[in-house]
Amino acid sequence: MIDLSQAVTSEPDFEKKQIFEPLKFCPPILQQRSAKGKHLEGYDTASLILGIVIIAGGILLLLDSYELIDMGGNQYSPAIAIYMNILGGSLGGGFIFWGWAEIRNRKKLEINRTLKPESPWYWDFDWKIEGIRDDLAEQLFWRAWMVVFGLGLFGPVSWMVFFSDHVEWQGFYWLVASIFIFVDLIFAAAVSLLVYQNLKFFKYGIPKIKFLEFPFFSENKIRAQLDNLPKTFSRMTLELRFIQEEHEAHGESYIYKFFQLFKEAKVFMEVPRQWDGRLLIDWQLPDKPEYVTCLNAHPSRYWELEVKVETSGVDYHSRFVLPVYAKP
């Protein structure tokens, strides 16, 4: 195991900057940075109810499928109702799972807040004392779910649009076809990203950082350990950031923005001596007592450590949220 003494350290950057994400203007199915804070209270309950309504509606549709008549007066096949039930069950199940998990977690944290109000690391986030994983597993689950649901919904429609025997390539049809080409390209990109993330998962597993102390206090150091890093690489970069999230309301939707208030980087230009894939993190925090993790605030604020390793084949990349708090 080595420490950070062989790394080249950058100058601390305290300028507020919006974090640039190449895919931040794309649909959520392509985004890789997700909001950590609990911004929208009540959406968990609404999600749970919506999921139940979708599944119940699908069941009713299946029971009454014999009454479904198209515009030409022909009766629909019950297979269509079954197919719609599969899609509705997938969508509704996703809403129910997310809403139930959020409600359960929120109640647990509220109890901890009542019992230990002066120790926010017990109720600000569901921290595990031994360490934390990055969000690769969560990304894989939700992206796979969205890809399967989206392909199931738009795939048959795209087939009918482009390969139907009654297609007339004129007028309004060109507009409809161009919309579906754009949608299909998005899903093709999402499938490619999902494949790449799975390759990263099979090569490195789910990255995890071990906390050697818990929590970290704002005037002290971050002491942690990273294992299972690539044995060979051309460059390894660690970036410590303090992030503040903001979101802008646009009607009933929200656009999340991420601002960096502090950044410091440590770079290994070559494989260190005695390197065995384990790295000891001993990183002094800046003299900013107001820079503390607060994931339940609005807007939320938190520390994160991003690790990028350039190597042959699939590169290593992980991002960890850190429990940095003020002493009570």
Image (spheres, rainbow, N blue to C red):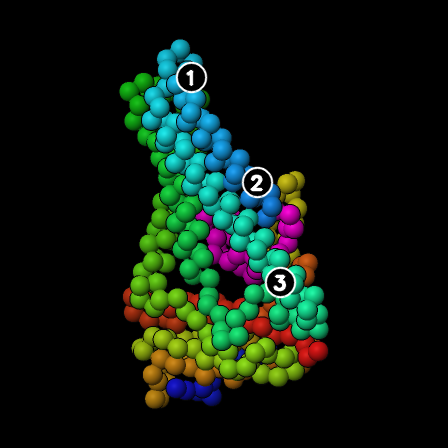
Mark 3 or 2, nearer chain start:
2
From the image, which quarter does the C terminus lie in? bottom right
Residue type pointed to by label 2: Ile
State the residue position of label 2: 49
Residue at label 1? Answer: 67
187 is higher (above) or lower (below) than 128: above
Q: How many residues crowd mark 2 within 10 Å: few (<14), some (14–19), many (20+)?
A: some
Between 189 and 198, the one lying in front of the other is: 198
Residue 120 visible in the current orientation: yes
Whichever of labels 2 and 1 marks the residue nearer the N terminus, that label is 2
Question: x%, y% of residue 1?
Answer: 39, 86
Q: Is residue 11 magenta?
A: no
Per the rendering, the mark at residue 265 is none
Tell me whether the residue at label 2 lies in contact with that at label 1, contact meaning CB atoms closer than 8 angstroms: no
Residue at position x 55%, y 76% from top? 264
Q: Residues within 10 Å of mark 1 (few under 14, many from 20)?
A: few
| Image position, residue 306 (x, y; %) | 49, 70
